[in-house]
Amino acid sequence: MVEISRDLVAEGQLQAVEEASKDRDKFIQEGDFGRVGEPLIEIRGLRKWFPIKEGMLSSVSSYVRAVDGVDLQIFRGETLGVVGESGCGKTTLGRVLMGLIPISGGSVIYSGSDIREIPNKEIRRKMQMVFQDPGGSMNPRISVRSIVGEPLQVNGICEGVELTRKVEELLDSVGLKSEHMTRFPHEFSGGQKQRIALARALSLDPEFILLDEPTSALDVSVQAQVLNLLEKIQKERGLTFVFISHDLAVVRHISDRIAVMYLGKVVELADSDEIYRNPLHAYTKALISAIPSPDPDARSDNPPIEGDVPSPVDPPPGCAFGHRLQHPDWEMSTKMDLSLREVSPGHWVQPCPCCTDEYEGPRSIDGSHADESQEGGESADSPEDIVERFDPITGVKVSEEDAPTG
């Protein structure tokens, strides 16, 4: 966590970030945090398809597959980062998770119950969201006291003097002063608005908060302050976060696990450090290579991604990323089951021959290798064999001398 924060934190904020990271590591080691027991949220085969209507009768001609079969578990007390480039479906996933838009298929299970069967008033007290544009999520005509206190009033928790006291406590918890209560949104900076939005999300004492790119519109130094604040609040309240972002540097700083999304699907899932130390999917490698480095002489070993993102209206069969790269082994992926497979403890990846350089091939639930043929029990080309012939990102053929060894 600390070394990546040096890239994204201004010099004056570095010490605070290092201290926060040490506190977080100590917190985890002491056992107050961990994936113990049942997950808080389970996402099972989740789909969100938006219909495209045409003609005078507005008949459905096709669908935009924004989220197309996502399986995830979110454990109590953790921060799950969700990353990917624009249009990958990460924000839609978050909005479906929060019940802001209806589910097309699959399910979201919260504490053992389908989220669609939980009354809205009850689920709103347990799950809250902080939006990317804090100013756009606030009524510009009402004061901060009303913005932060409205959830308390609507739910009949407190009124009058007690409401004012509660709002003061919430503002103090996010680093704002009581005198800010009488001001209006336009009087605050972007970082202050995000703190107000966080105070409002905390007002009902939720268990879970979805953070949709909460730092993308902020300066680097302000980003560090907000990230440190989120870690502090999570530690104090035992909250569970899903942190959505396109910035892998920021996500690594705050997340315990990271899910990488591409064209509506999760292609890799692992602990934060594992994703950076040992990325297996070519798309994950490309995202990591795109992180800016403060060293002007630093050069990535991975070339930039070429090609256009396939249309979510008519996605290609098989591996969508391999199709984008026009990889020579893409057609092989159209005949494979590309469901996530666990290749090492806690590290899940889409077992694609053109994007995943697995030495032995990931194992399925029954323990057999994904690349075993049906006839004679002989193995087809393993993903490693394929990677030895072609670079996993460019698809360029490499010689035996250049090929990686066991």
Image: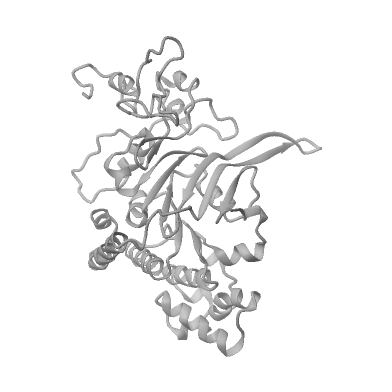
Position of 124 compared to 341: left or right?
A: right
Q: Quadrant of the N terminus?
A: bottom left
Residue 218: x percent and y percent? Answer: 40, 62
In depth, the one of 33 and 242 nearer the eye is 33
Position of 80 compared to 24: left or right?
A: right
Position of 91 compared to 53: left or right?
A: left
In the image, farthest residue toward the bottom? 161
In depth, the one of 130 and 27 nearer the eye is 27
In the image, farthest residue toward the right? 57
In depth, the one of 125 and 223 nearer the eye is 125
Residue at 39 percent of width and 76 percent of height: 175
Q: Quadrant of the C terminus?
A: top left
Q: Is residue 87 visible?
A: no
Residue 31, by quadrant, is: bottom left
Residue 183: x percent and y percent? Answer: 51, 81
Residue at 81 percent of width and 37 percent of height: 57
Please determine whether, in this image, residue 391 is positioned above or below residue 300.
above
Q: Is residue 210 visible?
A: yes
Residue 278, by quadrant, is: top left
Residue at 32 percent of width and 38 percent of height: 279
Look at the image and name its color scheme.
one colour
In depth, the one of 92 and 333 nearer the eye is 333
